[in-house]
Amino acid sequence: MPWPRIGVFILLAACMAALCSAEAFAGSEHPPRVVYLHDESAYTLSVSGGGSRQIEAREASSYSWSHDGRYLLVQVGGRHPRLVILSPSGRYIRQLPVEISTVFAYGWDQDTDSVLFGKLVSLPPCHHGRCPERVWPVFYRVRVRGAAWLMWPHRLPKGARPVAAGAGLSAYPKFGDPALSALKGELLTSEASLLFSSRQRVIVFAKGIGSYASRPWRVLDLRTGTHRQLPFGDVKGPLGVSGLFDGGPVDAVMLSSKGELAGQVGGRVAVMPLRARRHWRAVGWGYAPVWSPDGRYLYYVASRRMSKINFEMRVEEPAIFSCVHKGKLDLSRCGAQSQPYRKVWLWQPVQSAVNEVSVRRASAAGYRPVTLFSETGYGIADVNALPGNGRIIFSAVPSDAPLYLRRNRHGRVDAANASLYRPYIGIQSWTVGSSPVLLVDHARLPAVQP
C-alpha cells in the first residue's frame, strides 16, 4: 500500500533536517569551532571534524564566545587569574585591563564586541559622619581594544573603593559522589553570572559575594536605573543543594535575543518576559536551560532516577573533609584542628544513582516541551544548540556504575579501582534523527562558536 502523502512529507522533512544539520558546515569556508578542556588545557575543534588545536591559554578555567564568534574571552592564571581575549584559532590578542580579584561577575555584550564586568564597592568606615555597612554593584565596560569606562552609575562617590569578590575563584566542588562532583563542576563553571544587552539596555546579574549560596538575580534597567529582583535561584531541586561542602545551588539564568528570560524555580525550568511584569511560567522539571541561537526554542535537561547505588571507596583527602557530619563542618568529630589540610586516607560513603537523562526542547514561551533524545548516565551539561536547531553538542557525565561493579563483598572499592573507574566527562554530539555520538573523550566544558 502506498504511503500517505503527509507521511512522505514528514519523512522527507526529517531526512533533510538531519542531512542539513550534519553537513551544513562541511562546505563552508570557516565552519564553527568548539572550544573545550582536556587535561586542564584548552583546545579548539571544528564542528565539521578534523584535528584539534591547543590554544594559547595556560591554566584556562572558563571561557565564552563573543556574539559574532570573532573573539574568545578566557579566564586564565590559576591562583592569579586574569582575563584575556583570543582569536577563534586561539591566537593571543590582549589582556583586559581589570583586576579580576575585585570582580564579582563578567560577560560579553550580547550585541557588540565588548565585555561588561561588575564590581562591588563600599565607602570607607565613616564618610562625612555616616558609617554605611553595605556594598553595591557598579559596572564597567571595555571593548576588545581600548580602556574600560564606568557604565553604571555614571560616577562614584568620593572615597568609594572595591571590595574582594569571587569571580576570579575557580571552584570545582567535591562531594562524596564522584558523578555529582563532575556534574556540579560542569554546571557551576559554565553558568553565566552576568548578562548584558546593549540593544535591550539591561544588565541581568547575580548579586553574590564570592559564594555559591542562594543568589538573588536582578535586572538593572539602564534606561531608568531601576532594579528588579527575579524569582530565579534553584535551592530546592535535585541539584539545588546548598552549603559549604554541597557546592551551592545551580541557578543559571539565560537571556534570549528576543527578550525572554529562563531560569530555575524550585527544581523546575521557568521562563518569563524581560520587560513585562507577568508571573513566571513553569516549563518542566529540569536544569541547565539554554536558548537556541535564534531565540525560538528553549533547551533544558531532564533527569529520572532508574536505580540507586550505594558503596564506599578508598580516597585520599584533606583531613578537614573527615570532619563533615550531616553536611556540616564539625571539628569536634575529628583531629583536624591543628593541620586541617594534611592528606589522610579514608573510606568515603557514596550514595548515587543511575539516571535516564534527556534533553528537551520547548517553544520560547515555554509551551509544548518535547524530548529530543535520552541516554543512561548521571547528567548532561553545557548544551550548545547549533544554528538551524538540528544539532546539539554537550558534555555527558556518566554514572558511578563502573565503580559500583568493582566493590568487594563488604561493599567497598579499593583505591586503585576508585582512581581507575571514576566517571570521566565526555563531549557528545546529537543530530536530528540519530543517537548521540562521542565527539571528544575525557573532555569537558564545550562552547560552540556562534
Image: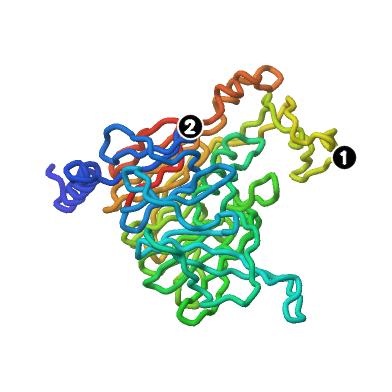
| Amino acid residing under circle 1 | Ser
Tell me: 192 left or right of 308: left
The residue nearer to you, when weighing 258 against 5, is: 258
Q: Secondary structure at mark 1?
A: helix
Q: Nearer the viewer, mark 2 or mark 1?
A: 2
The residue nearer to you, when weighing 129 against 191, is: 129
Badge 1: few (under 14), some or many (20 or more) residues near its Cα, within 10 Å? Answer: few
* Quadrant in the rendering for residue 410: top right
Look at 55% across and 49% down and name the residue there.
188
Does residue 140 lie above or below 303 as drawn?
A: below
Badge 2: few (under 14), some or many (20 or more) residues near its Cα, within 10 Å? Answer: few
The residue that label 1 is drawn on is 332
Look at 77% across and 81% down and name the residue there.
129
Does residue 165 lie above or below 279 as drawn?
A: above
| Amino acid residing under circle 2 | Asp
Q: Where's residue 251, x and y in %?
A: 56, 56
Does residue 374 lie above or below 101 as drawn?
A: above
Q: Secondary structure at mark 2?
A: loop
The residue that label 2 is drawn on is 39
* Quadrant occupied by the N terminus: top left
Q: Where's residue 402, x and y in %?
A: 54, 25
Determine the residue located farthest toward the right in the rendered image. Answer: 332
Look at 70% across and 48% down and name the residue there.
244
Q: CA distance from mark 2 to mark 1?
A: 37 Å
The residue nearer to you, when weighing 14 against 263, is: 263
Q: Where's residue 2, x and y in %?
A: 12, 44
Q: Is residue 327 visible?
A: yes
